[in-house]
Amino acid sequence: MKSKKEILLEINKLCINTTEKSKLQNLINNISFTINKNEIVALIGESGSGKSLTSLSILGLLEKSKFNLSGEIRFNNKNILNLDNNAMMKIRGSEISMIFQEPMSALNPTMKIGEQLFEVFKAHENLSFEHTTERIKKLIKKVKLDNVENLLDKYPHQISGGQKQRLMIVMALSCNPQLLIADEPTTALDVTIQKEIIEILKNLQKSEKLSILFISHDLRLVSNISDNILIMRNGKIIEQGSNKNIIN
């Protein structure tokens, strides 16, 4: 007998419009979908289809003065669209985390990698130095960075693009989030490294009991990672279903 899936994130009739009078327009038009616990959902579409706007709205990162949002974004059965900034800050990072496509802009070029990692952990978790060190070591091993000599003493410019992206995954997982949003995390990487990052995310999804929203414009790429696929065009979801059905 199949076990009943538990919904982690449910989006109901989400609409996003700009508030600027000169260009009032529907950017996201009445979209609905769910992500279950321990599931990878791919959101794909061309540039400008509304993928990143959707992810930013889940994290509460759209400026309320510039965008009108309506509908529901239910996370663990709570409508997070109604939360104020302080309540959202508690969820962001600790329960919902994000990896962006450009790791260079998220890393501080003037700080050593070790300092940056400890800073992220300290910001969210009240862990002792020993616990923090232990968790960092464990995650570094899981993203296969444990063979980089003196990694924590290096500066970001001293490691490759693929290694930076893995570092971003370590940072995103620092607080054991339940949902990880990966916004085109492999776009700037070559095909071999893309495959490695996909494998790492798949393994982490199992070992960390994660749900992942994987955003991409590449159907071939998401066919290797997702359970379900959502296809977006012009702010609407035009097709959604299991990986197998959509690929066929």
Image (cartoon, helix red, strand yellow):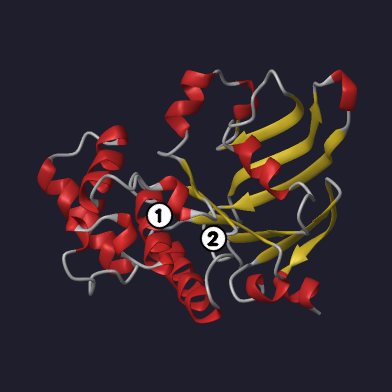
Is disc 2 placed on a helix, strand or loop?
loop
Q: Is residue 47 above or below residue 189?
A: above
Q: How many marks?
A: 2
Give the Cα distance between marks 2 and 1: 9 Å
Which is nearer the eye, 117 or 95? 117
As drawn, the residue found furthest toward the left would be 130
Picture quadrant where residue 116 is located: top left
User: Residue 4 location, x and y as percent?
Assistant: 61, 57
Q: Residue at x 52, y 51 (%)?
A: 100
Q: Quadrant of the C terminus?
A: bottom right
Kindly identify the amino acid type of the residue bearing the numbered disc 1: Met
Q: Which residue is mark 1?
A: 168
Q: Which mark is residue 185?
A: 2
Marks 1 and 2: in contact by CB < 8 Å?
A: yes
Kindly identify the amino acid type of the residue bearing the numbered disc 2: Pro
Q: Is residue 10 above or below residue 244?
A: above
Question: In screen coordinates, is 56 left or right of 202?
Answer: right
Question: In screen coordinates, is 197 left or right of 225?
Answer: left
* Crowd class of label 2 (few under 14; some 14 to 19; many from 20; radius 10 Å): many
User: Residue 165 location, x and y as percent?
Assistant: 43, 61
User: Residue 97 location, x and y as percent?
Assistant: 47, 45
